Amino acid sequence: MTRTPVNVTVTGAAGQIGYALLFRIASGHLLGADVPVNLRLLEITPALKAAEGTAMELDDCAFPLLNSIEISDDPNVAFDGANVALLVGARPRTKGMERGDLLEANGGIFKPQGKAINDHAADDIKVLVVGNPANTNALIAQAAAPDVPAERFTAMTRLDHNRALSQLAKKTGAPVSDIKRLTIWGNHSATQYPDIFHAEIAGKNAADVVSDQAWLADDFIPTVAKRGAAIIEARGASSAASAANAAIDHVHTWVNGTAAGDWTSMGIPSDGSYGVPEGLISSFPVTAENGTYKIVQGLEINEFSRARIDASVKELTEEREAVRALGLI
Ligand code: NAD
Ligand code: LMR
């Protein structure tokens, strides 16, 4: 191993996403096949034993890139020197529950974690919040970390992006790899808006290829937006392997960049682009290069899209008001 290991902190390491995520981080899928990692696992005290079990299994894989594993129930220890932080630990939504119900339960987790990141993480820290409600949890963590540049706090909408890619591929018969420039706007919730008006399928405009407005409005958008609930209904538990896969994709793209001519979707602090109020953590089309990302500018937003983006942004604004009233930001 010649490169300096990267410190990757994962919260909720003993949970179901953690179990699907850690082995892929350790095998090089998060940062690259030549980047060694130190894994720092944060769990609540009662789950430390289970985290130790996962760590034993990680040892048993003899991953050449896995330099060390540390387990802690103290955020100040787990985030010490962290270069990448994956905030997964949270209470998952159960059947019939909306994400809004989770605001209070999970808000309390992300404020102390944000503070620990502020006080102990490395200067180049990159944070991905997976735990729901992801956008607003990211806002809470970011508000508690005033010394960290705000744009380092991001929320995961890559799972929604990947879901939309698959649905569009199924409808058109095109391979996923032919689809570019798809966008998820807004919140990682049922109000999110998967936008195909700027997407391309093998170089052709996706909305023209589909040319079926009813499918778009009544099938595609609700299928993507409610997929999380459909998985819970089918599996009796929220998505785990696909969520872990999306977390890997999100960080890998952020660190290694988007492909030429394509973009991805990330929940990021708004700079006011596309009429999204500044500071809200909302999903945008972004390109990434050299470890930084930028919102894709200049897209024309039609009336159909505008109404749907506004509805999701309204929900994010309400979530921000709710956590403000709870004293979490
Ligand atoms: P899980 O219940 O299996 O695991 C969560 C783990 O977090 C548990 O081991 C728990 O002990 C731990 N935890 C709780 N509080 C903690 C704290 N303060 N510090 C550290 N660890 C803590 O849940 P899961 O299925 O792994 O899901 C985790 C979260 O991810 C949930 O909020 C779920 O809704 C969310 N999720 C988000 C997306 C997305 O696309 N953004 C997709 C799927 C799931
Ligand atoms: C998902 O999108 O699969 C998760 O966010 C689970 C959920 O609560 O919808």
Image (cartoon, rainbow, N blue to C red):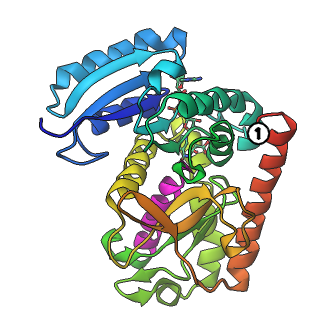
Residue 113 in the image: state x and y as whole percent: 59, 29
Residue 328 in the image: state x and y as whole percent: 77, 34
Rendered residue at 52%/21% (across/down): 76
User: Dividing the picture into quarters, in which one does residue 262 lie?
Assistant: bottom left
User: Dividing the picture into quarters, in which one does residue 256 lie?
Assistant: bottom left
Circle 1: residue type: Ile
Q: How many marks?
A: 1
Rendered residue at 66%/72% (across/down): 273
* Ligand 1: quadrant of the figure: top right
Q: Is residue 300 magenta?
A: no
Residue 186 in the image: state x and y as whole percent: 66, 61
Q: What secondary structure is the magenta-colored segment mainly? A: helix
Q: Along the line of sight, which residue is nearer the eye, 207 or 256? A: 256
Give the extent of the magenta segment: 153-171
The correct choice, above or below, for 56 with respect to 25 in the image is: above
Q: Along the line of sight, which residue is nearer the eye, 74 or 198? A: 74
Q: Is residue 160 magenta?
A: yes
Quick check: 142 left or right of 159? Answer: right
Asked whether the viewer can see residue 287, the reply is yes
Q: Along the line of sight, which residue is nearer the eye, 63 or 271? A: 271
Q: Which residue is mark 1?
A: 329
Asked whether the viewer can see residue 14, the reply is no
Q: Secondary structure at mark 1?
A: loop
The correct choice, above or below, for 87 with respect to 45 in the image is: below
Residue 81 in the image: state x and y as whole percent: 41, 30
Rendered residue at 14%/32% (across/down): 64
Quick check: 137 left or right of 12? Answer: right
Rendered residue at 70%/68% (across/down): 272
